[in-house]
Amino acid sequence: MIDIKVCLDCKGYKSKPTGSEVGQISNRIGKSVELLNCPASYYEFVYKVAKRGYTFSPATFNNESRNENNFQQMQLFALDFDNNIPDKTVSFEEVKDRANRYDLPILFAYNTFSSEDYKEKFRVIFLNDVPINDKTGAKILKSALMTIFPEADNHDSDISRMYYGGNRMRYYNPNLPSINPDSILRSMTYYLKNERGSKHYKDHVKKFAKKHGIKLTNNGLLDISVKEWSTESNGKSDNGKILPNSILLIKQDGKNYPNYYYQINLDDGVTKSSVDEKYPRTRTEYRSSTLKEIRKNCQLFREFESGERWLHHAELFGISTNVIHVESGINTFSTVLSRYPNFYDRTKQDNFDFYLRYNKEQNYNPQSCNLFCPYSDTCTHGKNILSTAKLRRGTMERITNYVDDCLPKERVSEVYEDLKDTLSQFAEAKDKMWYIIKAQTAAGKTRAYLELMKTTEKRFLIAVPTNKLKQDINDRAHEENEELMVTPSLDEIKDEMPKEIWSHICHLRNTGQHKRVHTFISRMVTEENIECLQEYQKEQKYFEDHDGHTITTHRRFLNMSKKELAKYDVVIIDEDIILSSIASNQCEIAISLLKTIRKLAIKNHYKDPSYQKLIKKINKVFEAIKRKNMFKLTAFEWYDDGSENEKEDVDGIPALTDIPSFCLAEHFMYRKASEERNLSEDCIVFLKPWKFKDIKHIMVSATVDKDICEYCFGKQNVTFYECKRAAYEGTLNQYYDKSMSRGCIDENPGILARISKWSGFQNMITFKKYPIGDMYFGNAIGCDHLKGQNIDVVGTPYKVDFLYKLLPFSLGLSVSEDAKMKSCLAAHNGYRFYFTTFDEGHEVLRKFHFWMIESDLEQAVGRARLLRYDCTVNLFSNFPLRQANLMKFEYDDEDNPKVEKS
């Protein structure tokens, strides 16, 4: 629906106004502006003009005075056919047929008061799709219409002219069809070709250009182009140069899609043609093979090619602007038209024979799908048919109908209230389920549950990823006069105990002898009188007796018994425990070590029932790896009485690996050194077994994923809620030209230093292997000391490939062991892009892969707290994040890299 403004007189007439009436109408019509913004208002306007004799002016005027100097804008074009010149008479049906011939649909037509049966006098009105607010532009387009219809009254060149109404409507199209500046000038060119011949029509185009001061392209055509609108492109050519002599007519479609505009370049003797500068082509951009991809990805093209239905002009034209960039595209399009003469008659075929070659010469951009395709709201597509079918590598393109396309409009305070209300609601729930709350980083989740603890008598257990975050939250609680019991941690006192003591504790942990840790500590307290361990035991006893709020770590939470958890009414897991403590808790055993374990077990413990089970399981491993890389074995519990034992092992076996976890594990992967560059020998790998208790859990995180949670906890056990989202107070710029994987960084020596020098930022988060700062991917979660500061985040944090299969396999999902990572066209967060991931057919693996990468990136970016602070994060990665401003970064110039907004 096009909203337009016209001047419409307030009085209707039954005959042509004369004498003083003319002056009265002229004086008042500039003040009588009508807005046509719905079908009813259009019809009322047409009815008043065509049947009630109301005078109108297509233009509106500044100062409410009708004259050309006060011209403001116009969006209707009227042609007056008086048939007063004998050799220029024409009937309405002839005008209508010609308009249809040149794809210029008429909005309405009416007879004037002077019309007679023997001599038709009528007016024809066209609706333009953009308001023309430039006098020169209005005159150019009016003159072009009069070239196509030379029988029209010469007075029509006056763009401020008013037109008297009539008493008979000849035609009205309630569909409100429109023309546009491009179609007008293209149709005029086609008309001249038909009337003046293919050898001479460009001479007439040249005369028209000279008359109106329009620039010509190198092909001798009028320099008009259609472009998508952005603030950066305002008044500029494609090479970024200012165009002082250009007419820009902006189209606003009222949707969330990008607006577009028509640009007519005037000849100032200096400005180069914007058309010629679009693509300095040496060959067709896309090979013929692209047509196969178009058929695969574009429903509209399939319908066109198969003749499934008739396509209207806008659909045909939109397709044509895309296929002209494909080898054999023009021939394919013309062949399809001729294949279905019942749909597309000879006239339509001739028209498109011209349009295709005209658009090719004019170097037309492929038209955006949302401008013509009826499936643009349901199809997952890019900017146009070509990019949807074959996106160029190294580019990132927005999915135009992505539901999350608009920037969030909620205020941060509204996001916080939504989070707090949801948290309170879930805390009151009675079901033993997983209640998952996804909320942006810096939305205020810590503040929300600390405030909730003050207003309820329920006892809370808070589980956080790290000891550091545990202490930070405890400090915040004390500042707000909220008492929290902090669970003691051996890791926090490791520097206070003798190295050999800590080494032995680590050994017991790593080999799964967790029950022996506390026995060993008790003995060390008695025999060695180690003060820090004495204090640890006191704190541990206090924790066991404590009956209030408690804060602990994810790992400790997983090891707590149901009896320990029973004293808490609300369990809140801060951040994503799946990624922090399940996916990351892997165990690897070399095949050679398994053989050694089996040998020792047979030699020393063959008759022991536990060792018999162990030997049997190891044998099944060896059988399985002959046939497959992923396999499942029966679990059993390794006998461990927890008794005191001064040795680090029993006949060498527990010292070699985590036997208890191996015995309890069910899902395994076989990794071959011959297939992995950084693997020294063949091994098996598994996730250390975990088990959640049958209680209610509330998990709050910015990176948690609904599908992953349902895979892990069971779909029937998950209630998932994503909080309202607010726009960043700060700025996230994303430079996606390079992947910035570890390999990419290694292949570009000094690139991290160059980025720091260019940005001038003091803080950088990247991979652990590069010693920059105290934060890196994997340990940034929850850290708050960089809030409000500018940060460079550099890297696409791939994990070891096997983990993307091992976790879903361990969750019981069907996973293909043959699935490989490769460069694929992917869609995520509203963008289409090429990315090294699992290809189509392995959606589950891709889901886990993207979740892990996005989690690490969001946690790193989130350290600046962009939601609440006006600072900047520069993200160098080819994985798109929400609310990122996509930029291109030219790395070639080390001292002065170029940046371009995408």
Image (cartoon, rainbow, N blue to C red):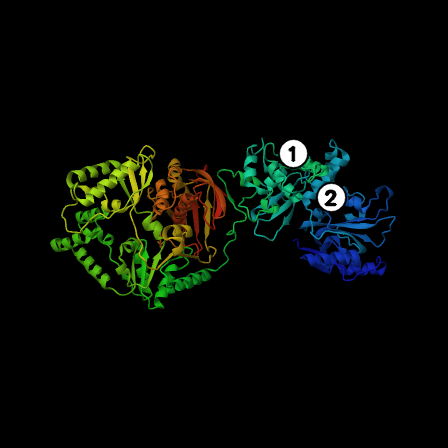
Q: Position of residue 841 (x, y in %)?
A: 45, 41
Reading the chain from its start, which is encountered first: label 2 or label 1? 2
Q: Where is residue 365 in the image (x, y as percent from the top left)?
A: 60, 40
Q: Mark 2 points at which residue?
A: 100
Q: Residues within 10 Å of mark 1 (few under 14, many from 20)?
A: few
Q: In this view, does 380 lie to the left or right of 71?
A: left
Nearer the observer, disc 2 or disc 1? Answer: 1
Q: Is residue 671 left or right of residue 405?
A: left
| Front-most of residues 595 and 282 | 595
Please tell me the numbered disc located at residue 114. none
Q: Name the residue under label 1.
A: 335
Residue at 22% x, 46% y: name it: 511
Q: Where is residue 309 in the image (x, y as percent from the top left)?
A: 64, 42
Callout 1 amino acid: Thr
Farthest residue toward the left?
527
The residues bearing labels 2 and 1 have C-alpha atoms spaced at a distance of 22 Å
| Front-most of residues 713 and 391 | 713
Callout 2 amino acid: Asn
Does the image show residue 437?
A: no
* Mark 2–mark 1 CB contact (< 8 Å): no
Residue 97 location, quadrant: top right
Element under label 2?
A: helix
Q: Where is residue 57 in the image (x, y as percent from the top left)?
A: 75, 55
Q: In this view, does 84 lie to the left or right of 320?
A: right
Q: Residues within 10 Å of mark 2 (few under 14, many from 20)?
A: some
Element under label 1?
A: helix
